[in-house]
């Protein structure tokens, strides 16, 4: 089980980026995202709509106090991988992290408090240079799942992309019927 915790979400500043954290988490194998910060029902509704259209089982849920949430997570046997520029190199620790049965991957929206560094079982750096938390999350999940998430099927999808060399092809699934839509070269 792998889920993501986004801490410090701010509606006006972070809505698009937190949405991208959720989309990347879903596409790259996480089961869901817990969002801490300002209440943002529009964000949760948007992610829920994506899941309804593109399939799979994935949740986005707002939480209150992230410190209490992390304590509860750890109390239930879960481990925490906090993605930060200041951690151990991902390539050096991902093999060990992969063995964990219940993993919470934490990405911050604003400056992350010292408590998170102390609570984390793993402080993990994808690189020690400034970059996006979406990039860090995507690379971490890809390394964690060893690329297997790239071929994952999402059950119950209403639409699917049909890979091709040139053009846009979409498979529309309507009550069992399937049809192609889109442009071809």
Image (cartoon, rainbow, N blue to C red):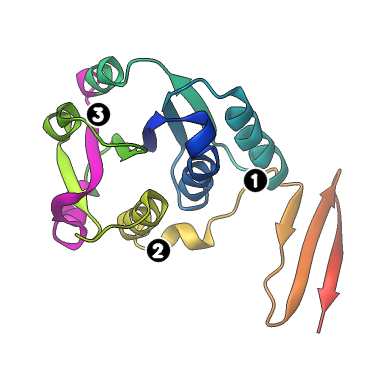
> Does label 3 or label 1 sit earlier along the sequence?
3
Q: Which residues are magenta?
A: 74-97
In this rendering, position of residue 11 left or right of residue 93:
right
Name which residue lies at 36% across and 53% down.
Answer: 141
- How far across and down, in percent of the image, does residue 180 sit? 85, 65
Name which residue lies at 14% across and 60% down.
Answer: 92
In this rendering, position of residue 69 left or right of residue 185:
left
Residue behind mark 3: 78
Q: Residues within 10 Å of mark 3 (few under 14, many from 20)?
A: some
> Does label 3 or label 2 sit earlier along the sequence?
3
Residues at circles 3 and 2 in contact by the CB criterion of under 8 Å: no
**Is 133 drawn above or below residue 36 in the view shown?**
below
Name the front one of labels 2 and 1.
2
Q: Which mark is residue 155?
A: 1
* Residue nearer the viewer, 12 or 37: 12
Where residue 104 sits, quadrant-wise, is: top left
Name the front one of labels 3 and 1.
3
How many angstroms separate mark 3 from mark 1 (CA)?
27 Å
Where residue 145 sits, quadrant-wise, is: bottom left
Residue behind mark 2: 147
* Residue nearer the viewer, 129 or 83: 129
- How far across and down, in percent of the image, does residue 81 sit? 23, 41
């Amino acid at each position: 089980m792998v889920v993501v915790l986004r801490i410090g979400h701010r509606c006006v500043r972070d809505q698009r980026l937190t949405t991208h954290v959720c989309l990347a988490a879903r596409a790259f194998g996480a089961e869901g995202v817990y969002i801490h910060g300002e209440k943002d029902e529009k964000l949760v509704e948007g992610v829920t709509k994506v899941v309804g259209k593109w399939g799979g089982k994935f949740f986005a849920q707002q939480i209150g106090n992230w410190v209490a949430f992390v304590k509860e997570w750890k109390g239930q046997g879960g481990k925490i991988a906090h993605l930060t520029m200041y951690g151990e190199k991902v390539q050096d620790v991902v093999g060990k992290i992969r063995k964990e049965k219940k993993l919470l991957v934490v990405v911050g929206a604003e400056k992350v408090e010292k408590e998170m560094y102390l609570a984390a079982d793993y402080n993990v750096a994808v690189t020690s240079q400034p970059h996006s938390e979406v990039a860090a999350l995507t690379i971490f999940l890809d390394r964690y799942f060893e690329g297997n998430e790239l071929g994952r099927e999402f059950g119950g999808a209403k639409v699917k992309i049909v890979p091709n060399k040139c053009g846009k092809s979409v498979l529309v699934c309507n009550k069992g019927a399937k049809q192609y839509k889109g442009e071809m070269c």
